[in-house]
Amino acid sequence: MSHTEHLLLIEDDPGLRELLQEELEAEGYRVTACPSAEAAHAPLEQGDIDLLISDLRLPGADGLSLLPVAQRASPTPAILIITAFGSVQQAVQALQEGADDFLTKPLEMDHFLLTANRLLENRRLRREVQRYRSIMALEQFHGIIGQSSVMRRLFQDIRQVADADGPILIQGESGTGKELVARAVHEQSARASAPYMVVNCGGIPGELMESEFFGHAAGAYTGARKARAGLFQQADGGTLLLDEIGEMPLALQAKLLRALQDGKVRPVGSDHEIQLNVRVIAATNRQLTDCVADGSFREDLFYRLETFTLQVPPLRERIEDIHALADFFLARFNARQQRLIKGFSDDARAALQRHPFPGNVRELENAVERAATFCAGNLIELVNLPERLQQNKPHSPCAPAVPMLDNLTGEALDQLPSLETIQRQYIHQVLSATGGNKRRAADILGITRRTLYRWIE
């Protein structure tokens, strides 16, 4: 059996020291043996010791003196103290000061080896838990992961519009995380402690929409035996997210516009209006300007909603966030399924970086879950990823496609990518093609590495 752990053994009895070293090495561990506490300081301070095994009574300084040295090491090793039977009280003191376990002499070898194995396994598990916790908390803004420039700008926009009180329109492709952005606005606002309600406008039958949104009075229609509060009333004082607002029927759009303008709603079958205080957020993956043009969305409602507009970027415009997102999804999978997959192989990471992800963050999340489910080892390999990601082979770097500019007018001109976007896409294509080799990428781009680092940031 082969292990990668490094053990530090301190024992002044030469015969016992040699025996323990041989037994541990036979188990596959790498062992450094020392006759005294003083001799153990140097290897401990180097920080690559996984398990410290020390006799309590030693010539010169005793084993207890090594505990603070070990606890200052990074990462901290597990600690096993060995003591004579008459010194159990000191062994208990060692546990109180940070040791993980102790054994009394004479040692029973099988018990000794089992204890060492158990302490190392516990240490591995603790480190994995710490790693998952650090990943789960990594660079999040109200649950949104992203450190790319486009995401930092989005976070700043969220902070600014959260302080206002008007309706918000969130636009973005399917799978980009529009609902997360809406929740972030709510949590960033003064309404954070008030209700947060979500409704999918495409998931409610048209004939029930008005009642669902505004409630109904008793006897308003067959089966309405008692009054029922609608979503607006339930969200009073807080925030209401209208997801897929482009699916809302025109008749209801008119009533929504009035609710936004007056702050009042009228339940179905009621003669009285109810004054409410609700912050409305609308989200859609459709171009509402096209919907206005074809008559399926009211122009006046569009202009009322677009006062504060947040655009959620697709994943292909924030590819520098892919690895952090993938690590986050893997850590969450490990926590839910009680797995210990450590990460991704270089080939798997390169495939993730190359893929255009038309399904955006949701597609990445599903790809990681699928890969983790089929992963039999401790690293996700290329073969574990969905086939469409495996087939997306590396290619020579080339500039991103630039749209033809002939005869473009109006909205088509507004949709053209900025120079910054094209530059960012090309830089990351070159980095992907060079396997992340920044020196080679800088040579291809004709810039210095310092300039490349600045552009990446």
Image: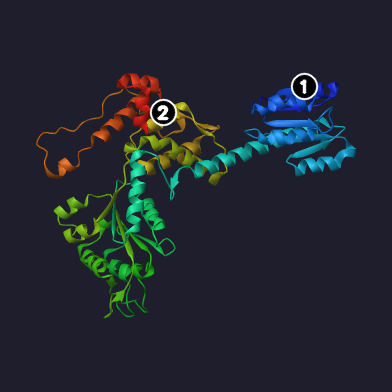
x, y percent for residue 163: 35, 58
Query: Does residue 114 appear in this view?
Result: no
x, y percent for residue 367: 42, 38
In the figure, 122 relative to 307: above or below?
above
Answer yes or no: do the residues labelled 2 and 1 have beta carbons within 8 Å? no
Quadrant of residue 133 in the image?
Answer: top right
Question: Which type of secondary structure does the marked residue at label 2 adopt?
Answer: helix
Q: Amino acid at mark 2?
A: Ala
x, y percent for residue 343: 51, 34
Residue bearing mark 1:
22
Left or right: residue 373 compared with residue 66: left
- Quadrant where the N terminus sits is top right
Instruction: Identify which residue is drawn at 43% across, 40% down.
Output: 325
Left or right: residue 11 compared with residue 421: right
In the figure, 334 relative to 10: above or below?
below
Instruction: Identify which residue is drawn at 21% across, 57% down.
Output: 302
Left or right: residue 42 compared with residue 377: right
Residue bearing mark 2:
350
Instruction: Identify which residue is drawn at 37% across, 74% down.
Output: 228
Quadrant of residue 382 in the image?
Answer: top left
* N-terminal-most mark, 2 or 1: 1
Left or right: residue 16 compared with residue 152: right
Out of 80 and 119, give the one closest to the viewer: 80
Query: Does residue 311 appear in this view?
Result: yes
Residue that lies at the very extreme toward the left in this rendered image: 407
Question: Which type of secondary structure does the marked residue at label 1 adopt?
Answer: helix
x, y percent for residue 323: 43, 35
